[in-house]
Amino acid sequence: MTRLFSVTATIAALTLSSPVLADDSGNQWKASAKDAWIDGKAEATLLFNGQLNTFDINTDVRDGKVILTGKVDSEVDKALATELVKSLDGVESVDNRLSVITPDDFDGDWDAFTRDLQDAKVVTVIKTRLLLDDQLSGIDIDVKSKQGIVTLSGTVRSESERDLAIAIATNTDDVDDVISELSVDS
């Protein structure tokens, strides 16, 4: 106990005698929190833009500088990603390292690959919308998509929640049909 007290007292004395140490930790925390906020905002902005396939775009933020990595389908998509992120509050600069991938660059079945990416995007958008809707227990809903056909499974608290989840999925771009396997947990 005495050793713990002396370590605590030493740390407190150093912190009080060195305002730079105290200020640095507070500033580092603020900068880190600001970067995390920018990162979340950048990802959401890219995700909800209907022109981009955001499944392969990653964001990283350091001191207000956003680094974009991953793959896009065209130079236009690459430029769009930069412009969308650059317009966000707090962004100091954008380092766009996105690669442009065309069908010629892909060795496999390009159509199957793009369908898989489209399904992944649909799942991400629907799951995000379910989680953000305060009228739903979205964490208990599983979302799968295969060639534009979305399957919802899991439990909801009421018939109204089930109907809302189905409506959210149905109203999502690139969804052709919704199959509900949701059960109501009364």
Image (tube, helix red, strand yellow):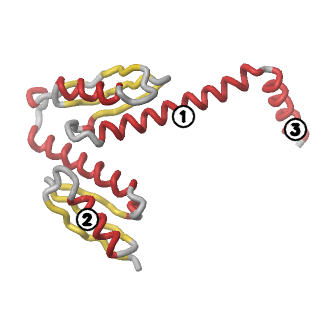
Picture quadrant of residue 12: top right
From the image, which quarter does the C terminus lie in? Answer: bottom left
Q: Are marks 2 and 3 in contact (CB under 8 Å)?
A: no
Looking at the image, which is closer to me, 172 or 111? Answer: 172
Whichever of labels 2 and 1 marks the residue nearer the N terminus, that label is 1
Picture disc at residue 5: 3
The residue mark sitting in front, 1 or 3, is: 1
Mark 2 and mark 3: span between their CA atoms?
58 Å
Q: Return the residue at label 2.
A: 166
Residue 170, position as x, y percentages in the image: 21, 60
Count residues near mark 3 (Cα–Cα under 10 Å), then give few for <14, some for 14-19, many for 20+.
Answer: few
Say what amino acid the circle numbered 2 marks. Answer: Ile
Taking the image as shown, residue 5 lies to the left or right of residue 77, namely right
The answer to whether 169 appears left or right of 8 in the picture is: left
Identify the amino acid type marked 1: Ala
Which of the numbered marks, if any, corresponds to residue 33?
1
Q: Give SS at disc 1.
A: helix
* SS at badge 3: helix
